[in-house]
Amino acid sequence: MTNTRSNWLPLAITLAIQALVSMAVLTAPVMAPVVAQALGVSATYLGLYIAIVYLGAMLASLAAGAAVARYGAIRVSQAGLLLCAAGLLLCAVPSLWTFVLGGLLIGLGYGPITPASSWLLTLTTPAHRMSLVFSIKQTGVPVGGMLAGALVPSMLLLAGWQGALVAVAAANVVCALVAQPLRAELDADRQPGKPLKLGNLVQPIRVVLSQRALATLAACSFIFSTAQLVLTGYLVTYLSQVLAYGIVTAGLALSVAQIGGIGGRIVWGYIADRGLGANRTLATLAFIMAGSSLATALLHTSMPTLLVFTILFVFGVSATGWNGVYLAEVARRAPPGMAGIATGGTLAITFLGVVLGPPVFGAVSAAAGSFRYGYAALALPVLICGIVLLRSRAPAPGNK
């Protein structure tokens, strides 16, 4: 690989790919009421779509490390984009079964993107900039969410729900084509003879469990991902039902939290690289996340809107801002040459938090009679993560 390693190109293409696949995941949920009506089901059932997507993502993330080693990070990312496009096109067929299959394909496309980008960015990023670079790349997730929220409703009005799905599919295909000229240079380290076998699915988990630091990071990411999805998935309903906010104001509050996440990912990456270190940065984020979750549980109708938005902004800064620092630290702690495999293993556990965490939150809230209790209960496991991370030993300078 040439001096592209030291310039902005790998970051730019991985950021664009991350944003497009994230937009693909959220396109159908943004149109949930319309899609549900077309499929003849209740909109509440479309919540299962996210679980199906992330189940596919879990499986794909486990296979990603070996696939990246054999085919290269760019080729695997292109395959992910095309799988997302195919899934969106299947979702456009007005059938519940094709919608389920489409969600699974989108998950299979989404899963390998982060392990592939971690592999590439680990090779092309100086060690002292890794947290910042990984954090900038991970802003692609909330950027994709903002693109879905801003563009998909307009496309729905212009071309219908099926037209919107086709348009986002086309954008994913275009991104795959744009990445093609970079393939020869950025995939120069691929190993075409590396075998792909069923045992490769187990290897990432073995790598994670064999390293205490990786296992700790993965376990904390399970809780952090739950907090992130609870914030984005339940906030509008919480504000509407408990604080009697209108849907427009509640949606604006969610946008404020997302903006906090975008800024937070960059700022925390910078702070981690500039001396605080990844473990202490993640511990700090956990403490802020726990406090924000508790503060969200205590929101009430007499609070000024600006204060509510400020609390939710801080919640977004922490609950959506941790990913880049976390992924950079996973890459640092991974055995030499295994950044992609270690990332795939930890992400499988992260995605498990996405699949299991929000339903548990919903069940706790339903049993207690209010989302307030769900947000209050969330603070405890997040706080425990902060304590565990604070007590974990950081690697010696210059070592993983």
Image (cartoon, rainbow, N blue to C red):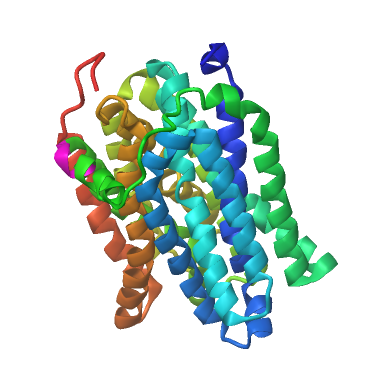
Q: Residue at x 38, y 67 (%)?
A: 358
Q: Quadrant of residue 244?
A: bottom right
User: In screen coordinates, is 342 left or right of 273?
Assistant: left
State the extent of the magenta-drawn residues as a range.
208-212
Q: Residue at x 49, y 43 (%)?
A: 113
In this rendering, the answer to whether 231 lies above or below 18 is: below
- Residue 169 picture location, percent across and down: 69, 56
379 with respect to 108 (left or right): left
- Quarter of image, res 118: top left
Taking the view exactly as shown, the residue that stands out farthest to the front is 193
Residue at point 59% right, 55% down?
A: 84
Q: Does residue 54 appear anywhere in the picture? A: yes
Place of residue 17 in the rendered image (x, y in percent of width and height, measured from the top left): 59, 41
Q: Residue furthest top?
A: 3
**Residue 49 magenta-highlighted:** no
Position of 231 with respect to 79 (left or right) is: left
171 is higher (above) or lower (below) than 68: below
Question: Toward the viewer: 256 or 26?
Answer: 26
Q: Nearer the viewer, residue 22 or 205?
A: 205
Q: Is residue 207 above or below residue 94?
A: above
Q: Main secondary structure of the magenta part?
A: helix
